[in-house]
Amino acid sequence: MPEYHNDGADALPASKSQRKRDMDALQDIGRALTELPAAKLKKMNLDDGLLVAVLDFQKITANGAKRRQLQYIGKLMRVIDPEPIEQQLAALRGDSSAHTRWLHLLERWRERLIEDDSHVQQLINDFPQLDVQQLRTMVRNARKEREESKPPKANRQLFQLLKELIPEQGKPANSGDEQDDTQDE
């Protein structure tokens, strides 16, 4: 009786059902892209043809035309690597563990800045392009809000500043280098 092994060299091509499942998965990624606003799509560094197809989908109103456009988007996605797109979508949904780690890093930085002025100076040293006066004002206001049990407006502003300053891993850096920031945790 012959033995059947899937060694790679003698591997059978994917079944028609498997190819269809793969194409449906790509269409699902494409569908998720179509639900995003144009500004977020442009920040994702998508292939030009794919970006145009997704933006065109958002303009279409007829259901049959939408279905065909979605199939076209799936076809375009067959020739590109969908993994980076899936990671960016997961980050937007908040499913990504890397995204969660980044958010926790930002929260730790915010807490350190509010607790101790030495961390404020460290952040200023790590990011020389930072507006020092703005940072110190935000930290002072956040401390005052905490002492007086007020709503955390300055706290949120400080978090947004850190979010712009410290890039998420895998995303283009706006400024500075995050590697040094994680060492004193």
Image (tube, rainbow, N blue to C red):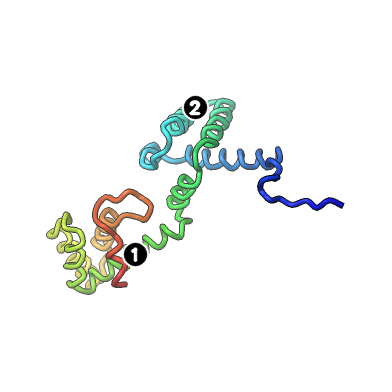
Residue 63: % across, % down: 57, 28
Indicate which disc, 2 or 1, sits on the residue closer to the N terminus.
2
Residue drawn where x is 23% and y is 74% of the image: 115
The kind of residue on which mark 2 rests is Ile
Quadrant in which residue 177 is drawn: bottom left
Q: Which quadrant is the C terminus positioned in? A: bottom left
Residue drawn where x is 44% and y is 48% of the image: 88
Residue drawn where x is 74% and y is 52% of the image: 5
Residue situated in front as seen by the camera: 149 or 131: 131
Is the residue marked by circle 1 packed among few (<14), some (14-19), or many (20+) residues within 10 Å? Answer: many
In this image, 2 relative to 28: left or right? right
Is the residue marked by circle 2 packed among few (<14), some (14-19), or many (20+) residues within 10 Å? Answer: few
Mark 2 in CB contact with mark 1 (< 8 angstroms):
no
Quadrant in which residue 51 is drawn: top left
Dot 1 lies on which element?
Answer: helix
The residue to which callout 1 is attached is 105
In this image, 145 relative to 78: left or right? left
Mark 2 or mark 1: which is in front?
1
The residue to which callout 2 is attached is 60
Residue 180: % across, % down: 27, 65
Dot 2 lies on which element?
Answer: loop
Residue situated in front as seen by the camera: 124 or 104: 124
Residue 137: % across, % down: 15, 62
